[in-house]
């Protein structure tokens, strides 16, 4: 990840997101998977964050996203999951027959931060700040 800058900050912020299809149904295949990948890129662009890498598995998705400090994790996930579910149900009505209850995604998700500096390095750096005085 490259250092990014805006008016009042310098940052490197990356997230690994994972979430599953409701009931872990393996429905994200073929044209549905292709439409989803294209849609995720469009949603990210519309919301000013970047999907650096993605993989759509039959029953879950993995995204590596970079964002600014102004982006809230919950808002990014809400946009990605909400818009994609509405779009896919509209374009592929057969999904509703496989996913009773009208929900494409499981309500939970995983998010992990991604960086090139380890937790141990950051802790040591902070701990040694006063040593230079």
Image (spheres, rainbow, N blue to C red):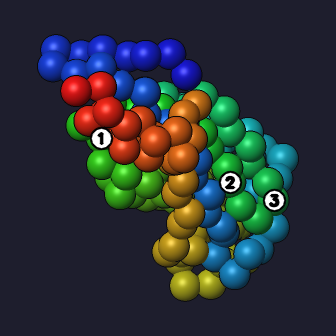
Q: Is residue 38 left or right of residue 109?
A: right
Q: CA distance from mark 3 to mark 2?
A: 8 Å
In the figure, residue 78 lies in which quadrant?
bottom left
* x and y, in percent, of residue 26 in the image: 81, 67
- The answer to which image quadrant residue 34 occupies is top right
For label 1, the residue is 71
Q: Dot 3: few (<14), some (14–19), or many (≥20) neighbours within 10 Å?
A: some
Element type at marker 2?
strand
The N terminus lies in quadrant: top right
Would you name the residue on which mark 3 appears? 58
Mark 3 vs mark 2, foreground winner is: 2
- Residue extending furthest left? 8
Q: Which residue is mark 2?
A: 61
Residue 55 image offset from top left, x and y in percent:
74, 43
Between 23 and 76, the one nearer to me in the picture: 76
Asked if residue 37 can be seen in this view, the reply is: no
* In this view, 75 is above or below 118: below
- The first of marks 3 and 1 along the sequence is 3
Q: Residue at x 76, y 65 (%)?
A: 59
Q: Nearer the viewer, residue 60 or 132?
A: 132
């Amino acid at each position: 990840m490259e250092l990014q800058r805006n008016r009042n900050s310098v940052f490197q912020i990356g997230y690994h997101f994972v979430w599953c299809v409701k009931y872990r149904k393996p429905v994200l295949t073929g044209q549905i998977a292709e439409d989803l990948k294209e849609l995720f890129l469009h949603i990210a662009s519309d919301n000013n964050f970047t999907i650096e890498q993605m993989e759509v598995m039959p029953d879950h998705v993995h995204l590596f996203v970079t964002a600014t400090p102004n982006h809230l994790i919950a808002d990014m996930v809400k946009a990605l999951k909400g818009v994609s579910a509405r779009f896919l149900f509209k374009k592929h009505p057969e999904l509703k027959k496989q996913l009773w209850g009208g929900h494409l995604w499981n309500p939970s998700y995983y998010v992990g931060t991604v960086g090139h500096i380890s937790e141990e390095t950051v802790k040591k750096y902070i701990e040694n700040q006063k040593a230079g005085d």
